[in-house]
Image (cartoon, rainbow, N blue to C red):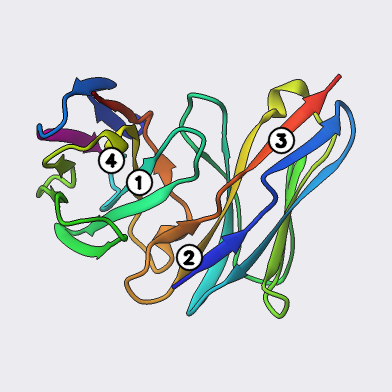
């Protein structure tokens, strides 16, 4: 089985940088994904890490440390439209699907 | 390219009734996943279908079931509805491949309300 822990809520200021952490306990871990979900909307894929290190996609970056069972999503130059819930998700081997964390509600203040 | 589609968008049922939700994956995707998201909560994995077979199911009672058709579309059936089944039901699809579960594309969801 798999379980993921992430903060329930993070507050940041427009234009700043924010980091959302995720720790996981898994068996047969493949990699860590991040999804964004706006209120009333569907989750959308942001990034995926299978190897240790940093993956950068525009203003968003994601990091993974397999030895620490830890990852984070980094959002730079925050914009009001980034206000949303962010979920980390782990994929495993065998017949396992994708297990999501409970999500982090990001609040951005002007 | 069309995304994942789901129908209906909203549904109101009463306790004890049965409901069928439908999902069409992105063209070329063979895996379909179903999730339940109760208000303010995270995504709870329900079912995973791939190539017409059920590959895995989450910790839900047997009254939650489904199937995948030869064209890879899928249905989720919920029998004997209970009030706590009220939630957003999300369908996602992914492409064939070794780590296909890593990148999933979600549909807009079906909002089910049980009265």
Residue B96 lies, in percent from the top left, at: 33, 59
How far apart, in angstroms, are the residues tagged by discs 4 and 1? 14 Å
Q: Secondary structure at mark 3?
A: strand
How far apart, in angstroms, are the residues tagged by discs 2 and 1? 15 Å
Q: Is residue A74 above or below residue A59?
A: below
Query: CB under 8 Å between callouts 2 and 3?
Result: no
| Residue corresponding to mark 4 | B25
Number of numbered discs overlaid on the protein picture: 4
Q: Secondary structure at mark 1?
A: strand
Residue that appears at 89% across and 28% down: A15
Quarter of the picture containing the N terminus of chain B is top left
Residue A100 lies, in percent from the top left, at: 50, 54
User: Which label lies toward us, 4 or 1?
Assistant: 1
Q: Is residue B25 above or below residue A22?
A: above
Chain of the residue displaying label 3: A
Query: CB under 8 Å between callouts 1 and 3?
Result: no
| Residue corresponding to mark 2 | A91
How far apart, in angstroms, are the residues tagged by discs 2 and 4? 20 Å
Quadrant of residue A16 in the image? top right
Which residues, given as a range, are shown in magenta? B18-24
Q: Is residue B24 above or below residue B99?
A: above
Q: Secondary structure at mark 4?
A: loop
> Tag 3: Cα neighbours inside 10 Å, few (<14), some, or many (≥20)?
some
| Residue corresponding to mark 1 | B35
- For the residues tagged 2 and 3, is the chain the same? yes
| Magenta stretch: helix, strand or loop mostly | strand
Query: CB under 8 Å between callouts 4 and 1?
Result: no
- For the residues tagged 4 and 1, is the chain the same? yes
Quarter of the picture containing the C terminus of chain B is top left
| Residue corresponding to mark 3 | A106
How far apart, in angstroms, are the residues tagged by discs 1 and 3? 22 Å
Residue that appears at 53% across and 66% down: A3
């Amino acid at each position: 089985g798999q379980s993921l822990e992430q903060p329930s809520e993070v507050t940041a200021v427009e234009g700043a940088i924010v980091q959302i952490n995720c720790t996981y306990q898994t068996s047969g871990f493949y990699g860590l994904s991040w999804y964004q979900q706006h209120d009333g909307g569907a989750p959308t894929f942001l990034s995926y890490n299978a190897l240790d290190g940093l993956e950068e996609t525009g203003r968003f970056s994601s990091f993974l440390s397999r030895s620490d069972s830890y990852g984070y999503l980094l959002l730079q130059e925050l914009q009001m439209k980034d206000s949303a819930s962010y979920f980390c998700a782990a994929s495993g081997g065998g017949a396992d699907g994708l297990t999501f964390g409970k999500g982090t509600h990001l609040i951005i203040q002007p | 390219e069309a995304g994942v589609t789901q129908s209906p968008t909203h549904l109101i049922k009463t306790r004890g009734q049965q409901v069928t939700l439908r999902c069409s994956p992105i063209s070329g995707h063979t895996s379909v996943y179903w999730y339940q998201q109760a208000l303010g909560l995270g995504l709870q994995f329900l079912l995973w279908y791939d190539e017409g077979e059920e590959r895995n199911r989450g910790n839900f009672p047997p009254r939650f079931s489904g199937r995948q058709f030869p064209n890879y579309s899928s249905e989720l059936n919920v029998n004997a509805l209970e009030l706590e089944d009220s939630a957003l039901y999300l369908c996602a699809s992914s492409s064939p491949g070794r780590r296909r579960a890593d990148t999933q594309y979600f549909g807009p969801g079906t909002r089910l309300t049980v009265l």
